[in-house]
Image (tube, rainbow, N blue to C red):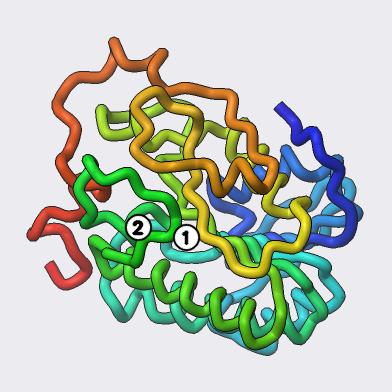
Amino acid sequence: MQPETSITGRVLITGAAGAIGSCLREGLRPYVGELVLTDARALEPADNERFVAVDLADRDAVMRAAEGVDAVIHLGAIPTEASFDDLLGPNLIGTFNVFEAARRGGATRIVFASSNHATGFYPVEQRLTGRDAPRPDTLYGVTKAYGEALGSLYADKFGMDVICIRIGSFGERPRQVRELATWLSLEDAVRLFAACLSAPPVGFRVVYGASANTRLTWDLSSARELGYDPQDDAERFAAELGGEPHRLHGGSYTDRDIGGWA
């Protein structure tokens, strides 16, 4: 399913070789002037794409990649829990470099791939809206809360539009009971990022990224205000998944023996 809203201009995608990056390349390519792709791994660009090999910890390289882009989708990061030393370069230094390169390069909007693990220690009985303070469940979640704080700063100080998506469980299908609530389908991911790119100026906003799941425990109204219209529901996979849901939003990431220092 392709986005209904037309997106113009040049869009930089960091971490373009990853699962979400690969999905967005396919879904957004027909609707932008150009996709500028960056990753540490080499990619073969398609029509309407340009690839730049970039280590996000290399500020000068990130600056060159972001020159002249209109918007940035920042996906590049270690996408799961790791040691602080491993997270430092891509998730902390790299995120600052991307925000600063976007500002200096002339971009007016950043869509930051945050994570539901920035708020993983809330109980599932509490419906989260995006206005909830961070309660990260891991060092990885801390790096995403840091990115959100950085986005707030760049919106307030420099007048940029920054939308942080607390992404749920992205994939072709849910893989465990918890994901019947948190699943984000490939098609809905394209719809969501397209809405974030094409929405009118919003300043700073945090939204949750999930499909229209029957068991959803996050409020998607803030994302819907941007034009997001999710179509998929994980419930059709429910009969195939056994087990009990976790009592906390972050699932097993909240367990004491899970962490970058373990």
**Tag 1–tag 2 contact (CB < 8 Å):** no
Q: Which amino acid does label 2 sit on?
A: Thr
Name the N-terminal-most of marks 1 and 2: 2
Give residue 114's mark: 1
Q: In which quarter of the image is residue 146?
A: bottom left
Q: In this view, does 20 lie to the left or right of 105?
A: left
Q: Quadrant of residue 69?
A: bottom right
**Residue pointed to by mark 2:** 80
Looking at the image, residue 169 lies above or below residue 56: above
Q: Nearer the viewer, residue 7 or 41?
A: 7
Mark 2 neighbour class, 10 Å CA radius: few under 14, some 14 to 19, many 20 or more = some
Q: Which of 33 and 160 is in front in this view?
A: 160
- What residue appears at the point 41 percent right and 13 percent down from the top-left corner? 236
Residue 195: give x, y in percent of width and height.
70, 46
Q: In which quarter of the image is residue 142?
A: bottom left
Q: SS class of the residue under badge 1?
A: strand
Q: In this view, does 190 lie to the left or right of 7?
A: left
What's the distance in space between the residues labelled 1 and 2, CA to CA? 12 Å
